[in-house]
């Protein structure tokens, strides 16, 4: 078996996949325009910098797949040829990936040859729930739209892939027998031929095809149901996260509960139970993070509220997802605690109560519209 020194990989230059393999790109959509954001209201302190950042990237990239022969895969799903590491905004591979590779790769790596045609199903962020449901599983949708048979190809994921990822991969119809799991810290996969779908997310927003993806995954998972008018959820990060936490969480959760919301810690529930809850809810409030993106499983009538700090680093992809799902939403901006390295922020109770009242009015309107459509 061929051996690699990790430094032989790290010393390669980063070159854009779009230029090197331009002829190997098969488009599904050539449109580069991204979705507008669905922000029905802001609450709290919004800085000029944060306000401007929401419109910074309105142009993305074409959607489709690269069909490439004789290419290698290493940690994080990073791709390289004999001459270069590949960078791509459409896959979240950038020059900064070099530091990640330097930290996680073993000094010596073994090459394993893959004869079967395969799909790269993961990338940076593979340990996180949110990346799976709005980024990696969109690749399964693109493969479906491109006409490939998912049962006649292999799907590449890391051997230490989280259990929840394996579960939802199975739920969308990919069998364990068709998975290629490899230890990406000490193994290099050299693929005879690989299909590399682009992402549907792009910076602060996402591609319009996200709407079709949401409909597709909801149908597969049985999420196309009428919401329960009494089911309101608050998704808390307090028992899991070490960053982006609400510092006055007890006060916030008491207000939330007094407004008829059930506090949920998503990591304590099975994947199936989570998806069932989200699909039936009429309102979902959450601390901004992966759990926020569970809004894609909810109905268009469901109102979404996101608590977040007032720094630009968190991003605005959530409001683009709500646009794709046809949902109304709001952000509640807290005051960031700059003396705390864990990025905690404080939510003003007055802002939170105002947002919950606003959500209730929107819920009433949406339910009335549903009733009118059933009884014109």
Image: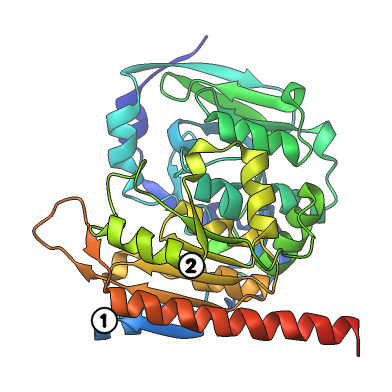
Comparing 130 with 340, the one in front is 340
Nearer to us in this view, 190 or 330: 330
Residue drawn where x is 48% and y is 67% of the image:
317
Examine the rendered structure and indicate whether residue 257 appears above or below residue 324. Answer: above
Residue nearest the observer in this picture, 55 or 240: 240
Q: Nearer the viewer, residue 46 or 370?
A: 370
Q: Position of residue 153 (x, y in %)?
A: 78, 33
Tell me the element at label 1. Answer: loop
Q: How many marks?
A: 2
Residue 124, horizontal then vertical, whole percent: 45, 44
Q: What's the mark number on residue 317?
A: 2
18 shown above or below 7: below
Task: Find numbered disc 2 in the image and state the secondary structure of the residue it sits on.
Answer: helix
The residue lying at 36 percent from left, 41 percent from top is 240
Residue 76 visible from this viewpoint: yes
Foreground label between 1 and 2? 1
Cβ atoms at labels 1 and 2 below 8 Å apart: no
Numbered circle sitting on residue 45: 1
The image shows residue 90 at horizontal and vertical percentages of 53, 58
In the orientation shown, which residue stands out farthest toward the front? 258
In-image side of 231 versus 108 (left or right): right
């Amino acid at each position: 078996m061929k051996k690699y020194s990790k430094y032989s990989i790290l010393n390669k230059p980063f070159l854009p996949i779009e230029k090197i393999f331009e002829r190997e790109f098969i488009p599904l959509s050539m449109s580069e325009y991204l979705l507008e954001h669905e922000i029905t209201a802001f609450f709290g302190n919004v800085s000029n910098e944060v306000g401007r950042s929401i419109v910074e990237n309105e142009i993305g990239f074409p959607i489709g797949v690269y069909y490439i022969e004789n290419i290698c895969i290493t940690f994080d799903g990073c791709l390289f040829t004999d001459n270069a590491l590949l960078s791509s905004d459409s896959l979240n591979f950038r020059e900064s990936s070099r530091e990640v590779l330097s930290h996680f790769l073993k000094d010596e790596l073994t090459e394993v040859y893959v004869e079967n045609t395969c799909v790269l199903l993961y990338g940076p962020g593979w340990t996180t729930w949110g990346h799976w449901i709005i980024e990696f599983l969109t690749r399964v949708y693109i493969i479906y739209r491109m006409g490939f048979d998912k049962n006649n190809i292999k799907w590449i994921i890391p051997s230490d892939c989280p259990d929840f990822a394996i579960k939802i991969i199975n739920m969308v119809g990919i069998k364990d027998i068709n998975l290629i799991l490899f230890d990406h810290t000490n193994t290099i996969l050299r693929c005879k031929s690989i299909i590399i779908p682009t992402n549907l997310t792009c910076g602060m927003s996402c591609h319009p095809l996200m709407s079709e993806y949401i409909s597709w995954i909801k149908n597969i998972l049985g999420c196309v149901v009428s919401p329960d008018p009494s089911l309101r959820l608050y998704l808390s990060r307090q028992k899991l996260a070490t960053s982006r936490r609400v510092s006055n969480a007890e006060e916030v959760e008491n207000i939330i509960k007094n407004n008829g919301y059930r506090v949920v810690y998503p990591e304590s529930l099975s994947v199936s139970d989570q998806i069932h809850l989200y699909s039936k809810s009429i309102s979902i409030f959450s601390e901004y993070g992966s759990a926020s993106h569970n809004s894609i499983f909810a109905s268009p009538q469901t109102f979404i509220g996101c608590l977040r700090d007032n720094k630009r680093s968190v991003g605005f992809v959530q409001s683009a997802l709500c646009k794709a799902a046809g949902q109304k939403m709001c952000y509640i901006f807290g005051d960031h605690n700059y003396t705390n390295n864990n990025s905690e922020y404080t939510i003003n109770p007055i802002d939170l109560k105002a947002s919950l009242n606003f959500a209730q009015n929107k819920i009433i309107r949406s339910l009335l519209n549903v009733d009118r459509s059933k009884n014109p």
